Image (tube, rainbow, N blue to C red):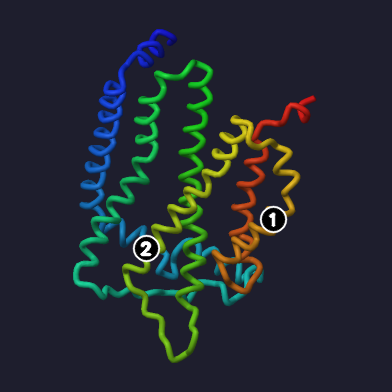
Amino acid sequence: MRQEKEQLQEMSFWGHLDVLRGVLFKAIILLVALTAVLFIFMPQIFDNFILAPTRANFITYQLFQKLSVDSVLPQQSAGSDFNIELINIKLASQFFIHISSSLWMAVVVAFPFIIYLIWSFISPGLYSHEKRGAKRGFLFGCTMFYIGAATGYFLVFPITLRFLASYQLSSLIPNVISLDSYIDNFIMICLMMGILFELPLLAWLFGKMGFITRNFFSKYRRHAIVVLLILAAIVTPTGDPFTLAIVFFPIYFLWELSSLIVPKAKKENN
C-alpha cells in the first residue's frame, strides 16, 4: 500500500492529469451509454414513473385518501379526485425534455458508479485506515442520496404538486400546467432532496476535520427546529399540520442523524 502511494506521489502533474482524464472519459462514456438506453425506454418511464404523481391513483395520494377515511388526514388533502393534464406549449419541448430527462435519470442511476470511479482515482493516495473511512463515507453518501431522492418523489413533490396545482389567486384564472414547468419542478425537488440528505455525510466530514462536535447539535437543537419548521412550511405551504409534519420529520431526522455520527469533543469523551 505504501509503495503504491509513493508511486502516485512520484507521478508528475501531467501523469495525474492523464489518470484524471481517463476517469472522466469513463464517466462520460457511462453517462452517454445510460442516456441512450434510457432514451429508448423514456416513453414508458414517463407514463409509469415521471407522470405518475399527476394521477389520483398515485401511491401517495392513495395513502392520503386512506388516512382521510380514517379521519387522520384532513379531507381537503386527500387525492381521490386529483388529476392533472399537462400541455406542451413549445414546438420542440417534448423532444428536448426527452433528451434532458434521459440524461438526468442517467446521472441518478450512474451516481454510485461515478463515485466509484472517483474513488479509484483518489484511493491510491490514501493509507489503509483512510480508505476504510472513505469507503464507509461513500457508501453512506450513495444510500442517503437515493433515500433523499425517493423522499422527494414519493413525499415532497406530490404534496407540492397537489398544493400548487390547486392553488388559485382568483377563480377567474384557471391553472394550465405546462410540461416544462412540471419537469423543472420534478427534477429540482427530487435532486435537491437527494442533495439535502447528504447533510449527515457533510456533518461527519466537518466533525472529522474538527469544525463541529456533537455538542453543537444539542446546543442549537431548538434553533434548528424553528428553522426546519420554516423550511418545511416553505416547501409545503398548505394549511393542515399533517402535511407540514410529514415534510418536517424527515428533515429533522437528518439533524438528529448528523448529531449521532459526528464525533464527540475530547471533553465530551472524558
**Residue at horizontal 64 percent and vertical 51 percent from the top:** 252
Secondary-structure class at tag 2: helix
- Above or below, 63 relative to 240: above
Residue 17 picture quarter: top left
Residue flagged by tag 1: what amino acid is it?
Ile
Q: Considering only order in the chain, which callout, 2 or 1, is on the residue closer to the N terminus?
A: 2
User: Mark 2 is on which residue type?
Assistant: Asp
Residue under the image location 22 percent in, 41 percent down: 33
On the image, the x and y values in percent for residue 139 come to: 48, 33
Q: Quadrant of the C terminus?
A: top right
Query: Residue at label 1?
Result: 225
What mark, if any, has residue 169 been given in the picture? Answer: none
> In which quadrant will I find the N terminus?
top left
Q: Position of residue 51 (x, y in %)?
A: 36, 64
Q: Nearer the viewer, residue 163 or 52?
A: 163
Q: Secondary structure at mark 1?
A: helix
| 150 or 97: nearer the viewer | 97
Identified at 27% across, 52% down, the residue is 102
* Residue 189 percent coordinates (x, y): 45, 58
In the displayed image of the protein, which residue is found farthest to the top?
3
In three-dimensional space, the C-alpha distance between marks 1 and 2, rounded to whole angstroms, equals 29 Å
Give the farthest residue toward the bottom: 172
Reading the image, the residue beneath label 2 is 184
Crowding at mark 2 (Cα within 10 Å: few <14, some 14-19, many 20+): few
Q: Residue at position x 35%, y 43% from top?
A: 109
Which one is nearer the viewer's eye here, 22 or 11?
A: 11
In the depicted structure, whether residue 86 falls above or below residue 193: below
Q: In the image shown, does 149 or 85 lie closer to the viewer?
A: 149
Classed neighbour count for the residue bearing mark 1: other residues with Cα under 10 Å, few (<14), some (14–19), many (≥20): some
